[in-house]
Amino acid sequence: MMSDLTNLTITEARDLLAKGEASSKELTEAHIGAMESARSLNAFITETPEKALAMAEASDVRRKAGTAGLLEGLPIGMKDLFCTEGVLTTAASHILDGFHPTYESTVSQNLWNAGAVMLGKTNLDEFAMGSSNMTSHYGGVESPWRKAGDNRPLVPGGSSGGSAAAVAARCALGATGTDTGGSIRQPAAFCGIVGMKPTYGRCSRWGIVAFASSLDQAGPMTRTVRDSASMLRAMAGYDAKDSTSVNAPVPDYEAAMTGNIKGMKIGIPKEYRVDGMPTEIDALWLKGIKWLEEAGAEMVEISLPHTRYALPTYYIIAPAEASSNLARYDGVRYGLREEGATLDEMYEATRGKGFGAEVLRRILMGTYVLSAGYYDAYYNKARKVRSLIAGDFAKAYQKVDAILPPTAPSAAFGMGDKMDDPIAMYLLDVFTVPASLAGLPGISIPAGLSQDGLPLGLQLLGKAFDEETVFKVAGVLEEAAGFDAKPAFLAA
Amino acid sequence: MALIKGKTGEWEMVIGLEVHAQVISKSKLFSGASTEFGAEPNSQVSLVDAAMPGMLPVLNKYVVEQAVRTGLGLKAQINLTSVFERKNYFYADLPQGYQISQFLQPIVGEGTIILDLEGGETREVGIERLHLEQDAGKSIHDQHPTQSYIDLNRSGVALMEIVSKPDMRSAEEAGAYLRKLRTILRYLGTCDGNMDEGSMRADVNLSMRRPGEPLGTRTETKNVNSIRFVQQAIEQEARRQIQILEEGGKIVQETRLYDGMKGTSRSMRSKEEAHDYRYFPDPDLLPLELDAAWVEGIKAGLPELPDDKKARFVKDFGLPVYDAGVLVADRDTAAFFETVAEGRDPKLAANWVIGDYFGALNKSGADLHTAPGDAKKLGGLLDLIADGTISGRIAKEVFEEMWENGQEADAIVESKGLKQISDSSEIEGLVDEIIAGNPGQVEQFKGGNEKILGWFVGQVMKATQGKANPGLVNQVLRKKLG
């Protein structure tokens, strides 16, 4: 019974609760049990079982009163980058030691307003900087997946690795993620789940610990496309407290999933055939093309000529913004303080000890590219290239309705691998970063397994604020792929 | 142009001022926290002002309106697109680790200010730009032996940085610039101009050169908080630079701090030690786009500005330029004058407002709002002069009384019996008595001593406690003595 409840999708659980066949309390208890028995994965930094039960009981009362919300009674994980009132919020960094916000982020509040129940705060790369979840001050997250015949632990991807692992391991029906350069889509691909990064401006950034403000965007991580659609609807919406939030109505995304993509034009970007891409990724991509063709869509080769500049552009803009965004962690007002004889020494000690190596690396890179004498050569040039990349997409979308690229150039790798090679780690973002720079929506869906038996993802990108088309096509792709593999952790 | 004579010849100073003016607004530039002065430390701090994680700035529209209004008041270019950037540096009272400011694209571009100098002379000074930025908090270093206290009440308060062109040539001009700027800001209601509360501060850029030669190396003296100190700092810095230059030295481009109490300045940091602020567009804020019609609406609602008012006072009221300048220096004073002058002789009104009324204000330390005699009462007094009820001399006495007890002029005249004696038979009788009683003085007058006439006038005034109509007294005396 317990595992039956944790194996449900969001839509199934929603229907079950609606029919009165289970209570939110039962559903939540089952997930608390799953969360506790999955502690070896280190997917959560903070578990909040008591809060979860209290929220579940309140939800059951609301349901009885006939005021059920979109996600009424459904237990989810909250990436520990979202500020949650009274609950430790760490961004997986030592520097936020003991930080209990007095406020609730807009997106988490939207979810609670829709009736969702918080199981706990999920692990992530420190300040969401990473593609492996290995940079967390609270230790790496172990993927619930294993290569066939190989029990070595693998990374869940990053930065939303805790959320991806928790959803894949059936500890939560869904979880929030944030995506700056692929931090939702890449871990979703590694863990065999669905990860959606909506259009920049769709979800409020208010109360989300900032990494790179012009790129950060919250989104849902779920096990099905339909779940993703229903969860995004609850998360999204205009927020006057975020000046970059866009005042546009939030459609019923589930309703857009008609299954009919006949005559739709899907762009296949020729520049995404990168050197040294594993043949299994290429093969999966071709399968995706075939599935969509079989469903009646028309494939159109498109060119996104500035794609090869996307990664270096991203790794200038994101660190530049981060170097400024992270200046507030100075030991003066909250979090960690390491004393020093002078103010400067206090800063040095606090920031030197409080930030991990990857965060320090990005602060240094960001400071460098904004410095006098280098600004034009790096930051300013990157901004120009960014608008060229956005222009590539705008041009392509005159011809196509959505674009189909792979999500990541490889399947998950071993915990600890690539740690001495930041560039190799950055290359994992090569397919996700362009849409981030252009602010466009993108979803990753599990589409197959590698030769080693690990999940691989396909991505669908849409026009700005046209998440509906993305969900519609993704639903068709999901059905055609019929991905039903389960992580080794569930079998154990 | 005031040249300074050094040991080796004449020097000219070149001065530019950067003024930080706190915008009058109930809430801060990017948060809803209050901006009221003098509150308990850290009682007016929002989550945004304290730079809590995940907090985002939201631009205060009213502050933008105030900046546009100021730009229009300075006859400046209003930029319909402007960009907020981050100026990055670490300091304990700068919670975000950056100040949100405007850099490459400020909201206001070039404009002008007309200085009112001694003797009614004017001079134009260019405005380079005006931009909006956040104030920092306040560090308090004297409360604890090893630690500093931080008050974030000011953190995030909206400032306008108003940058002049290097158009000023003396400390007097700098003073006149600050006074005029303050007057304009107060007219517009965009800054209260209270330098002692820190709501207006000036940075002084100064260099010296031989007349006609290219600009020399400048220094910047930071955060001078009164007009007097600005002028002193300029004099002091000019002497310091001249001494260095005349001894064959070179001016180091640097930032200096002026100590108004000691009257000295010291180097704060050199150009080499200058911060690299790493300005870049704030990604939390979109570029600020203004609607041209909205700007026009603000323009249409601008009050009459001091230069226009001054011109009108000269033209319509026939006031001397100097008097008009004095009256328009303060918007309330100008309004007070206009109320007094309404339907009366404007020159008489100006003399009374500038002379007696301002004199009484200065002496008592009162202002227009707390003074016992208001515009209506002063007007009533002038009416009594105009219709001959009292003489100008008696009017002074009535005014003093009015200032003492706040009564209306006619009531004072009535109760004290100060009404002017304009009855010629009464005066003739008095004159007859005086002539009869002082044959010696009559002889002197007849012998050609015209001056003795004044003595006779004095006698009449003495006998009437000054109430006799002076014109009539003269007339009668001449007739009787002649």
Image: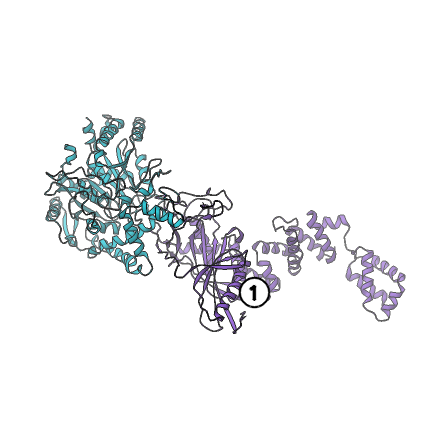
Chain colours: A cyan, B purple
Q: Position of residue B166 (x, y in %)?
A: 46, 65
Of the pair B269 and B430, the residue shown nearer to us: B269
Which amino acid, by three-letter code, is at mark 1? Leu
Q: Is residue A132 left or right of residue B46?
A: left
Q: Chain of mark 1?
A: B
Write down the quadrant of residue A149 in the picture. Answer: top left
The percent coordinates of residue B194 (x first, y second) are 53, 52
Q: Which residue is mark 1?
A: B117
What percent of the width, then of the height, locates residue B11?
Answer: 51, 71
In-front residue for pair B96/B301: B96
For label 1, the SS is loop
Q: How many marks?
A: 1
User: Is residue A116 visible in the rendered structure shown here?
Assistant: no
Placement of the N terminus of chain A among the 4 image quadrants: top left
Query: Which quadrant, please, contains the C terminus of chain A?
Result: top left
Q: Nearer the viewer, residue B444 or A126?
A: A126
Residue A477 coordinates in the image, percent (x, y): 15, 42
Circle 1: is it few (<14), some (14-19), or many (20+) Cα within 10 Å? some
Using the image as rendered, state which of residue B41 and residue B472 is in the foreground: B41
Residue at 20%, 45% in the rendered image:
A186
Q: Is residue B82 visible?
A: yes
